[in-house]
Image (cartoon, grey):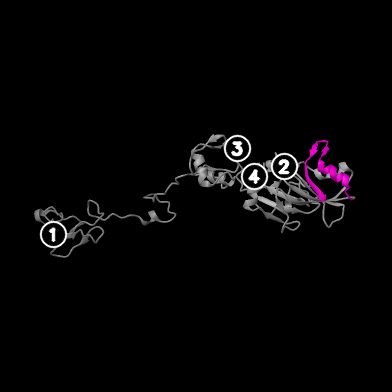
């Protein structure tokens, strides 16, 4: 078929001679069937009749379908092009440190309150980080940051309360758990928190020793206003005289002040060299100094009761975690 088949001697759109028709199912131009040129008008454009084919969806002005390079969306592709939108975090971390934690969790770990209550205190401006008030929810802090609540510096570690039945010859003052004969080494696997003993128990003594990272409780138990109950089983170099027993009951005054003894007595069924003594004083090495003052050598000392805690079901050299009720009872001590 020649070029003159079109009205007005106008060439049809397409390449070279011949009859071409744009269809929705082809890319670019493709040859049409003979005798089908009635669908084109004088200008060579598509007819507006109902039988005319519509332009494909997404086609450009010339009727060619738009194409997109699939590599644009390929994984790891470096090609420029449309990129999928990424959601930015609502609360970006304050620090990139892996050791950073949310402020409300930091406060909760310190034992002040729950996380939900901590959010309320944060919003109220009661919490400061490195001296500056923080009211942002989701704020993150590092363990090296100084966080204070109502002026009190907090400890982010989870509170731990460990009771040890210390054997004789173990040092309660040693700060290195790897040191031989260290009392701290006996509770090294009890918790990941950095705990330390409350007060001291002489190396030659045995019995109950409390470990915790609760600084407030440590201060309360080492410097109590009214004292608290501690009972010892003491073995002396000789039998305790009745007169000396009465002197202790009435009160002994040492170089650093009076010794507050609540009760002292011989132990039923035991030799006269063994006595039970209940004392309220928090002074170090007080039992040994008390009997030295009276002319007795302390051979053996075992602490059997400490602030209401006992050795029941706790063998020598073993430890246990305090119950919730025991912790409450300790915090009630004034």
Sequence-wise, the earlier of marks 4 and 2 is: 2
Residue of label 4: 332
Relative horizontal placement of residue 25, taking residue 145 as reference (left or right): left
Spatial CA span between label 1 and label 4: 93 Å
Sequence-wise, the earlier of marks 1 and 2 is: 1
Identify which residue, 307 or 18, lies in the foreground. Answer: 307
Measured as percent of width and height from the top left, residue 99 is found at: 58, 47
Q: Can you see residue 133? A: yes
Relative horizontal placement of residue 194, taking residue 43 as reference (left or right): right
How dense is the environment of label 3, judged by Cα within 10 Å: few (below 14), some, or many (20 and up)?
few
Callout 1 touching callout 2 (CB < 8 Å): no
Spatial CA span between label 1 and label 2: 103 Å
Residue of label 2: 227
Residue of label 1: 50
Sequence-wise, the earlier of marks 1 and 4 is: 1
Callout 4 touching callout 2 (CB < 8 Å): no
Sequence-wise, the earlier of marks 2 and 3 is: 3
Relative horizontal placement of residue 239, taking residue 171 as reference (left or right): right
């Amino acid at each position: 078929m020649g070029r003159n088949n079109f009205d007005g001697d106008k060439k049809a759109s397409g390449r070279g001679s011949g009859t071409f028709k744009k269809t929705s199912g082809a890319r670019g131009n493709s040859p049409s069937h003979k005798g089908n040129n009635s669908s084109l008008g004088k200008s060579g454009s598509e007819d507006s009749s109902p039988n005319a084919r519509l332009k494909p969806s997404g086609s450009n002005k010339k009727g060619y379908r738009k194409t997109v390079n699939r590599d644009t969306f390929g994984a790891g592709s470096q090609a420029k092009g449309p990129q999928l939108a990424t959601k930015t975090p609502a609360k970006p971390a304050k620090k990139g440190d892996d050791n950073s934690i949310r402020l409300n969790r930091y406060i909760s770990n310190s034992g002040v309150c729950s996380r939900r209550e901590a959010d309320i205190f944060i919003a109220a401006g009661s919490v400061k980080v490195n001296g500056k008030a923080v009211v942002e929810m989701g704020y993150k802090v590092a363990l090296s940051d100084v966080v204070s609540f109502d002026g009190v510096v907090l400890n982010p570690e989870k509170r731990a309360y460990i009771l040890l039945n210390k054997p004789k010859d173990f040092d309660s003052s040693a700060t290195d758990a790897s040191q031989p004969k260290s009392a701290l080494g006996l509770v090294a696997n009890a918790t990941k928190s950095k705990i330390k003993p409350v007060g001291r128990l002489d190396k030659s003594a045995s019995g109950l020793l409390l470990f915790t990272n609760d600084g407030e409780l440590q201060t309360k138990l080492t410097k109590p206003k009214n004292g608290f109950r501690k009972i010892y089983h003491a073995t002396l170099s000789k039998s305790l005289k009745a007169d000396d027993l009465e002197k202790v009951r009435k009160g002994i005054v040492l170089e650093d002040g009076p010794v507050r003894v609540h009760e002292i007595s011989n132990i039923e069924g035991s030799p006269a060299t063994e006595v039970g003594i209940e004392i309220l004083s928090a002074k170090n090495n007080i039992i040994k100094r008390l009997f030295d003052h009276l002319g007795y050598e302390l051979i053996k000392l075992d602490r059997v009761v400490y602030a209401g805690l006992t050795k029941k079901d706790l063998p020598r050299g073993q430890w246990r975690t305090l119950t919730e009720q025991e912790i409450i009872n300790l915090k009630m001590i004034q």
